């Protein structure tokens, strides 16, 4: 049961080793990297490649660890007991417990892929609150006075954009991989997956412009792999010719559909200012 990437996802050798080590050691895998490098998509592709169900828990700033386990709706139970507006048996507490993503994953008869997406968005104590649950693959439900244990240990993928540092105690219980920005050879493989019949000369010219923008000093949000794919798609839709790109000088000309590569006004203004200076301090 080895992960080697898929037809739609190019995984480097280092990434394949990290994923397979996490599966073999039954440890969560923390995946970091620039936005747009395929961290979230990785869990989807692991599920596809290993023929497993994917359960996704999207983390927000207000998300608590308890929500991933379960929530007991005491208000609904009180309302039903007073108003008699529900057919639910108010004496059965289970009717008022909402299972979280971890409970769902633990209950599965087959091993699933559990994606905890963007864990760094939550409160700083969030990872610590899941230490034992992810380590032991079990948790206690106080309202029911019973322990929920994983039937089959899930493959746990945890993504982070490095907005907050994760606690050492949490990191010790996980494996780690940083998805580095793809080198040109890997990027060509990624492009070929998305556009099998694309003209390679067009890719070469587009790469020169794309990597040129990434190297501009002062760029706040460097264009990522996902932006490159969107940009190439627009170039193909507009039927931009290789000659049009090759004749452009990034220090003097505005590339077509620049808005697909740069996503904030500061970076657009920076490029405009550099063009005014004739590319000085590029």
Image (spheres, grey):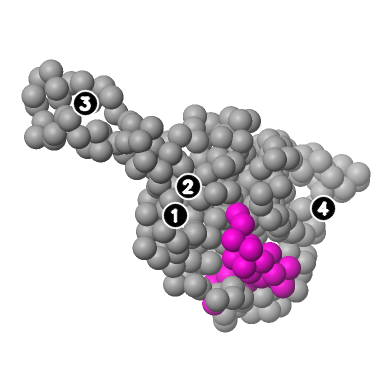
Q: Are marks 4 and 1 in contact (CB under 8 Å)?
A: no
Question: Residue 282, how many percent across, how many down?
Answer: 87, 48
Q: Are marks 1 and 2 in contact (CB under 8 Å)?
A: yes
Question: Residue 257, how many percent across, how many down?
Answer: 61, 55
Q: Which residue does the image show at 13% across and 18% down from the upper left?
A: 82
Q: Quadrant of residue 15?
A: bottom right
Which numbered disc flags the more N-terminal residue, 4 or 1?
1
Say which residue label 2 marks: 138
The reply, left or right, for residue 144 in relation to residue 147 is left
Q: Quadrant of the N terminus?
A: bottom right
Q: Quadrant of residue 263?
A: top right
Say which residue label 1 marks: 150
Say which residue label 4 marks: 215
Task: Give the number of the disc on residue 77.
Answer: 3
Q: Secondary structure at mark 1?
A: loop
The reply, left or right, for residue 213 in relation to residue 46 is right
Regarding residue 57, the answer to whether it shows in the image is no
């Amino acid at each position: 049961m080895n992960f080697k990437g898929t037809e739609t996802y190019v995984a480097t050798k280092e990434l394949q080793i990290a994923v397979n080590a996490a599966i073999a050691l039954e440890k969560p895998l923390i995946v970091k990297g620039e936005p747009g490098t395929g961290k979230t998509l990785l869990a989807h592709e692991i599920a596809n490649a290993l023929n497993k169900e994917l359960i996704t828990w999207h983390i927000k700033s207000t998300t608590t660890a308890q929500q991933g386990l379960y929530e007991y709706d005491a208000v609904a139970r009180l309302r039903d007991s007073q108003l008699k507006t529900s057919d639910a048996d108010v004496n059965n507490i289970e009717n008022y417990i909402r299972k979280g993503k971890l409970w769902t994953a633990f209950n599965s008869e087959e091993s699933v892929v559990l994606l905890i997406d963007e864990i760094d968005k939550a409160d700083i104590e969030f990872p610590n609150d899941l230490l034992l649950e992810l380590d032991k693959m079990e948790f206690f439900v106080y309202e029911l006075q019973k322990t929920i244990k994983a039937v089959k240990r899930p493959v746990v993928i945890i993504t982070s954009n490095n907005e907050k540092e994760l606690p050492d105690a949490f990191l010790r219980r996980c494996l780690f991989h940083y998805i580095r920005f793809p080198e040109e050879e890997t990027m060509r493989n990624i492009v070929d997956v998305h556009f099998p019949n694309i003209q390679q000369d067009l890719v070469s010219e587009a790469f020169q412009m794309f990597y040129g923008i990434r190297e501009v000093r002062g760029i706040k949000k460097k264009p990522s792999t996902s932006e490159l794919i969107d940009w190439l798609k627009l170039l193909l839709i507009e039927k931009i010719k290789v000659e049009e790109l090759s004749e452009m000088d990034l220090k003097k000309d505005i590339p077509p559909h620049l808005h697909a590569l740069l996503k904030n006004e500061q970076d657009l203004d920076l490029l405009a200012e550099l063009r005014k200076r004739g590319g000085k301090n590029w």
